[in-house]
Amino acid sequence: MTEHAHLLGILARARPEGLKALAERLLPNLGVIEVLQSRTGLVMLPMRDTVKGTDFHLGEVLVAEAHIRAPSGEEGYGMIVGRDLDRAMAMAVVDLTVAVDLSPTVAEFVEREAAHLAAMDRETLRAVEATRVKMETF
């Protein structure tokens, strides 16, 4: 996974309030931006069969997508599950800020959110593990 893909993965799962607040603080530094796309739609959800090792589509997922461009040509992109266009646009603004290298506060935010997401993932895995059935007990 590339560093940019990792960044987008964290931003897509970031807490909405913090992401939107960060984007509001960053937006004035970007100047005039061009909105290329701001829309909702359905995308296919790819999954991997862990036994056969093949990819398949689980179904469709509703997403909100935003694509923006700075006057200097750099682009920002955001796609989140759901229909929150403001959140997708906030993600695109943060991505664009990273592309034009304007803010060290983005790195701090991403580190904080990555730690939060890792903790949430650990909690989810603990909950899943708690539901595991030990077949030897039957």
Image: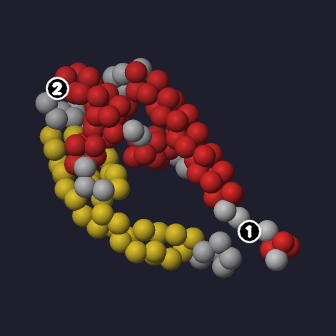
Q: Which residue is mark 1?
A: 133
Label 1: few (<14), some (14–19) or many (≥20) C-alpha neighbours in 10 Å: few
Image quarter in which the C terminus is found: bottom right
Quadrant of the image occupied by residue 32: top left
Q: Residue sitting at 24 percent across and 64 percent down?
A: 41
SS label for mark 1: loop
Frontmost of labels 2 and 1 is 1
Q: Residue sitting at 58 percent across and 39 percent down?
A: 119
- The earlier-in-sequence mark between 2 and 1 is 2
Residue type at tag 1 = Val
Asked whether the viewer can see residue 96, the reply is no
Task: Return the x and y of residue 37 as percentages of the image width and height.
Answer: 18, 52
Residue type at tag 2 = Gly
Q: Nearer the viewer, residue 19 or 78?
A: 19
Q: Nearer the viewer, residue 74 or 126?
A: 126
Q: Which residue is mark 2?
A: 31
Label 2: few (<14), some (14–19) or many (≥20) C-alpha neighbours in 10 Å: few
SS label for mark 2: loop
Quadrant of the image occupied by residue 20: top left
